[in-house]
Image (spheres, rainbow, N blue to C red):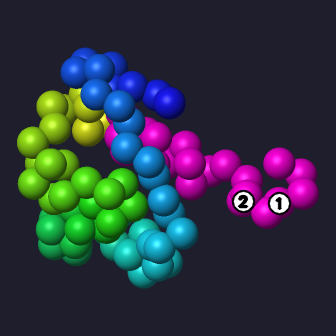
Amino acid sequence: MENYPVSGKPMPEINLREITLGEWRAMFDQSQPEHEGDNTLAKATGLTVEELRDLPLYDYRALIQAVLTKAAKPLDNDPKS
């Protein structure tokens, strides 16, 4: 499992199966309230919103990168993967 590059904490398990399309889009919509994106990211990572906001910047960036990488991977049931 990947680690955060600064603090060395284990990367939480990322589960995007519970995220709706609307929640996903709202995370990247700057007109949406900040807490909406935080709630969605917390839902996807199993962290609390408070834990997310307490992350050092580089750890937060690593977490976002891991979420985006996971979202770009082929689906688990894709026979090509």
Residue 75 disc label: 2
Which residue is rendered at x = 50% and y = 63% of the image? 16
Q: Residues within 10 Å of mark 1 (few under 14, many from 20)?
A: few
Front residue of this view, candidates 37 and 7: 7
Q: Residue furthest right?
A: 79
Which residue is rendered at x = 31% and y = 36% of the image? 61
Q: Amino acid at mark 1?
A: Asp
Total tally of numbered discs in the picture: 2
| Mark 2, secondary structure of its residue | loop
**Residue 57, image quadrant:** top left
The answer to whether residue 46 is visible is yes
Q: Is residue 72 left or right of residue 25?
A: right
Q: Is residue 14 left or right of residue 49?
A: right
| Mark 1, secondary structure of its residue | loop
**Residue 19, image quadrant:** bottom left
- Residue 53 drawn at (x, y percent): 12, 48
Residue 4 forms part of the magenta stretch = no
Separation of residues labelled 1 and 2 (CA atoms): 5 Å
CB-based contact (under 8 Å), mark 1 and mark 2: yes
**Residue 50, image quadrant:** bottom left
- Residue 2 drawn at (x, y percent): 46, 28
23 to 71, vertically: above or below = below
For label 1, the residue is 78
Give the magenta-colored segment's residue range: 62-81
Which residue is rendered at x = 35% and y = 31% of the image? 10
